[in-house]
Image (tube, helix red, strand yellow):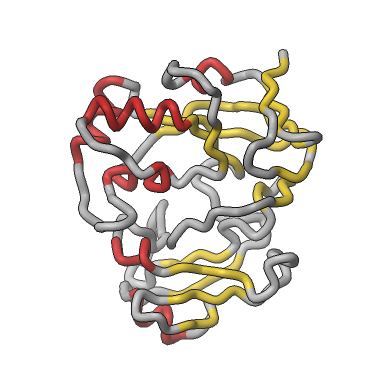
Amino acid sequence: MGAQPLESVDVDWNGFAGDRRWAFIRGDLVRSGFPWLTIRENQKMWQYMPHFVEPDRPDASVTMVTSPSGRDFDVVDPALAEELGHNARVIKQDRGVFDAFPLSLLTVQSVAALGASVGYELDKRRFRENLYLDLNSAESFAEDAFVGRRLRIGARLTVHILERDIRCRMIGIDPETLEENPDILRYVAKSHDNTAGVYAAVLVAGLVRPGDEIVLED
């Protein structure tokens, strides 16, 4: 669903506290390697905004979802699943429902370079990263060179960069207009091995805030 900017967040081995703990499964599938209902199947999900009743307790809080019409649903309300379609039902997984790993990172320089290459100013939210890094550099895709190394972010959080992030058509969907532009994924596939950003695992848990220092460790 819609992305939420944070003033701070606790990060541990399961990623951001409260992140991607709920998921909708398409009930019209009998067997599937990807049963999830996502923005790819229902682009209007970008306009549904989840939030915690108790934001200081994200893993224990009731989760509410505000629909595009302004109606608030408890995430477990069957009426929400019915509105989303696809005979969906909701589940909770305490460790989170991730594509591959609990953290994903992308530099704002890479977002800008991709936009320039396809002739559009891209909203970084379409990449659905946990962390957007500003390296104060004009160099794009600098994060590719981080694979196999460690980053310390803020006072304590230390992550191991594991691999590059393989992309799907999600990055072509504008989070505001919901219009899909396949040129973006085509460019990434042709010019950058179909990857943008990197995945990471947490080595040392810690608190992260916007503006924290980023240190690349050997």
Tell me what residue is drawn at x 19 percent, y 36 percent: 183
Instruction: Give percent across and percent down for residue 63.
Output: 59, 74
Instruction: Give percent across and percent down for residue 134.
Output: 54, 30
Q: If the image is split into quadrants, where does the N terminus sit?
A: bottom left
Instruction: Give percent across and percent down for residue 117.
Output: 25, 25
Instruction: Give percent across and percent down for residue 111.
Output: 39, 32
Asked which quadrant contains residue 87, the reply is bottom left
Q: If the image is split into quadrants, where does the C terminus sit?
A: top right
Tell me if residue 101 comes above or below residue 23 in the rendering: above
Tell me if residue 42 comes above or below residue 99 in the rendering: below
Q: Farthest residue toward the top?
A: 218
Tell me what residue is drawn at x 66 percent, y 47 percent: 15
Which one is nearer the viewer's eye here, 197 or 7? 7
Tell me what residue is drawn at x 44 percent, y 21 percent: 141
Q: Is residue 107 left or right of residue 180?
A: right
Tell me what residue is drawn at x 78 percent, y 42 percent: 206
Which one is nearer the viewer's eye here, 73 or 4? 4
Tell me if residue 127 comes above or below residue 60 in the rendering: above
Tell me if residue 196 comes above or below residue 25 in the rendering: above
Total numbered badges shown on the rendered structure: 0
Q: Is residue 196 left or right of residue 20?
A: left
Asked which quadrant contains residue 171, the reply is top left
